[in-house]
Image (cartoon, rainbow, N blue to C red):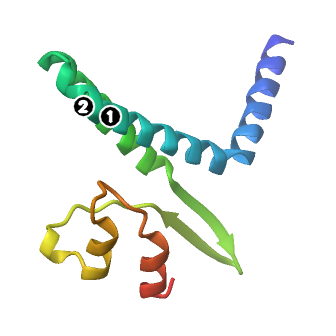
Amino acid sequence: MLPLLIGLGVLIGGVILVATWDELITSLRQFTIELEKAWQKNASEMPESVRYIGEKIIRGGVKIIRILHKVSFKENGRKIEKTMKTFETEEYQVPDHILRRLEGKQSADITKPMELELEM
């Protein structure tokens, strides 16, 4: 009886996880962004060993969110895989209209303009 209850619990948990996956990933992503901002603001006041461990944790969290933010689905009989990617580039490689959006900011969401530019 106990294995049946455990199996049922895992099944129900899996269904709930699948049903709320996008919300979960969005929440984790927001949490990671806020955590990273708070860390950057306060990291200079911490001892070097704490900063080192904190940087590892923040980077690990960002990597996990990137991996988790990969969605596969079927549309019109075709399998589609959608991922969120982050790239690091030199400033001279960034188009002027995007640099203007970044003026005075550390980061900016350029998803919509890039989707329009790439006709996605």
Name the residue rendered at 58%, 62% in the picture. 72
Q: Quadrant of the N terminus?
A: top right
Which of the 4 image quarters holds residue 9?
top right
Name the residue rendered at 64%, 51% in the picture. 22
Percent coordinates x, y for residue 58 in the rendering: 32, 34
Name the residue rendered at 71%, 45% in the picture. 20
Which of the 4 image quarters holds residue 61?
top left
Above or below for 76 versus 34: below
Q: Secondary structure at mark 2?
A: helix
Depth check: 22 or 49 in front? 49
Percent coordinates x, y for residue 84 in the rendering: 44, 61
In whole angstroms, how far apart are the C-alphas of marks 1 and 2?
5 Å
Three-letter amino acid code of the residue under disc 1: Ile
Q: Are marks 1 and 2 in contact (CB under 8 Å)?
A: yes
Three-letter amino acid code of the residue under disc 2: Glu
Depth check: 24 or 50 in front? 50
Label drawn at residue 58 = 1
Depth check: 22 or 13 in front? 22
Label drawn at residue 30 = none
Q: Residue placed farthest to the front in the image?
A: 104
Q: Badge 2 is on which residue?
A: 55
